[in-house]
Amino acid sequence: MDKLISSLIKNFSLSNASSKQLSDVISTRTFNTGDIFVKKGLIESNEFLMLEGICRSYVIDSDGNEITLSFFTPNKAISPNLTRTKKNISILNIQAITSVKLAVFSSNDLMLLMESNREIEIWANQILQKELTEKVDKEIAQISLNAKDRLLTFRNQFPLLENMVPHAYIASYLGITNVSLSRLRRDLMSK
Amino acid sequence: MDKLISSLIKNFSLSNASSKQLSDVISTRTFNTGDIFVKKGLIESNEFLMLEGICRSYVIDSDGNEITLSFFTPNKAISPNLTRTKKNISILNIQAITSVKLAVFSSNDLMLLMESNREIEIWANQILQKELTEKVDKEIAQISLNAKDRLLTFRNQFPLLENMVPHAYIASYLGITNVSLSRLRRDLMSK
DNA sequence: ATAGCATTTTAACAAATGTTAATGACAATG
DNA sequence: CATTGTCATTAACATTTGTTAAAATGCTAT
């Protein structure tokens, strides 16, 4: 548990004291490649911090296709519960796409800590606002950039992902087909 | 102010008592067509409820084009402050696209009321969650539907808007050009 | 009413992206 | 080490969407 505390301090920018408080309500969990640990339609009341591995959130569209909404990499928070539930029911799925290690704590415990610890309150609100501005940025990119520029933006944001996760996940994240992604990769190669 | 209270009760599903409490911190404001009353980069700490007219939120992309992110119609809340600011600075613009009448109150007043009145707390959280799920729905539509189906979805969601606001606003909301919108309108006519 | 301006539509063509199907690369398995 | 299955690439063609420019329409202020 010592390692968790130092990781919170170093990678999630929390003070020593706040990390200790948080660690009291945190447990760590591991999942295997492919595990879906948040499921659309089920009650969900936890928060997650990425320690190791890669995850994605996704939904199924009206044609039955999976659409990746976000990727999560180490030392980032997974979207706050508030932004991915409706009446405590999850509106999306979250899947481990490598083996992953997560810090897990209940939204309720976090709420209590936020009330008693100003630093944790600020920290949690920063995570929430980051999530929201990322959503706006993604929306603007999706509307104003063509597929090639969206891929370049993606590569910039997630330099390692393209070689680590199935391209189908990336294609749906970019709003294009697998075939188009492959074509863009070739076009960008030759330069 | 009586009219405001009855509007809150009827159109925003608040109880009589809660409406009264809210109305104590609410003032109404009117704006003219074209007025930009929330500006990107400026401090912004108010919440808005739509009473009359139509508004939109928008940003300027890297090519200098305006991109409409949302439309707001009567008896709906404008996106909560939390979702459109970063460190209390607005990340987008909000503009009246007809003459509008709004109910305005400070985010801080709302926070205080939420702490003392459980019903208002639930009401405000519902507005926030609705905003967030709408964002996810929009993202899914943008990725998984072609332009024609996005237009049909838009018409379903805002039956009157297409005849009331400049098509350029709608086109950027749908992620297409004005010319494409006009073409789709013709294609859909002939059926 | 009309001149002037902004918006919408139309047309012709170019570019981007989707669709389908075949091929290639690679890892897992018997 | 052959076989199978999954994923990525390629090719050919179809469709959608973008671009540019001109024409039509609508709106506003004299």
Image (cartoon, coloured by chain):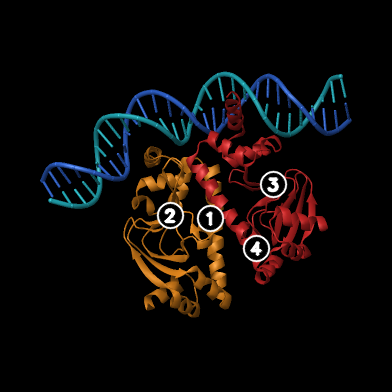
Chain colours: A red, B orange, C blue, D cyan
Chain to which the residue tagged by mark 3 belongs: A
Find the distance from the CA under tag 4 to the CA under tag 2: 31 Å
Task: State which tag comes first along the sequence, 3 or 4.
Answer: 3
Q: Residue B93 carries which label?
A: 2
- Packing grade of label 4 (10 A; few <14, some 14-19, many >=20) is some
Residue in the picture at 57% in, 50% down: A134
- Packing grade of label 1 (10 A; few <14, some 14-19, many >=20) is few
Residue in the picture at 58% in, 31% down: A180
Viewer-side label of 4, 2: 2
- Packing grade of label 2 (10 A; few <14, some 14-19, many >=20) is many
- Residue type highlighted by circle 4: Asn
Q: Mark 1 points at which residue?
A: B134
Which secondary structure, mark 1? helix
Q: Mark 3 points at which residue?
A: A73
- Residue type highlighted by circle 2: Asn
Kindly tell me whether residue B36 is visible in this rendering: yes
Q: Mark 4 points at which residue?
A: A88
Residue in the picture at 64% in, 41% down: A158
Find the distance from the CA under tag 4 to the CA under tag 1: 16 Å
Which secondary structure, mark 3? loop
Task: State which tag comes first along the sequence, 2 or 1.
Answer: 2
A21 and A147: which one is in front?
Answer: A21
A62 and B54: which one is in front?
Answer: B54
Chain to which the residue tagged by mark 1 belongs: B
Location of residue B87 in the rendering, given as x and y in whole percent from the top left corner: 54, 59
Same subunit, labels 4 and 2: the answer reads no
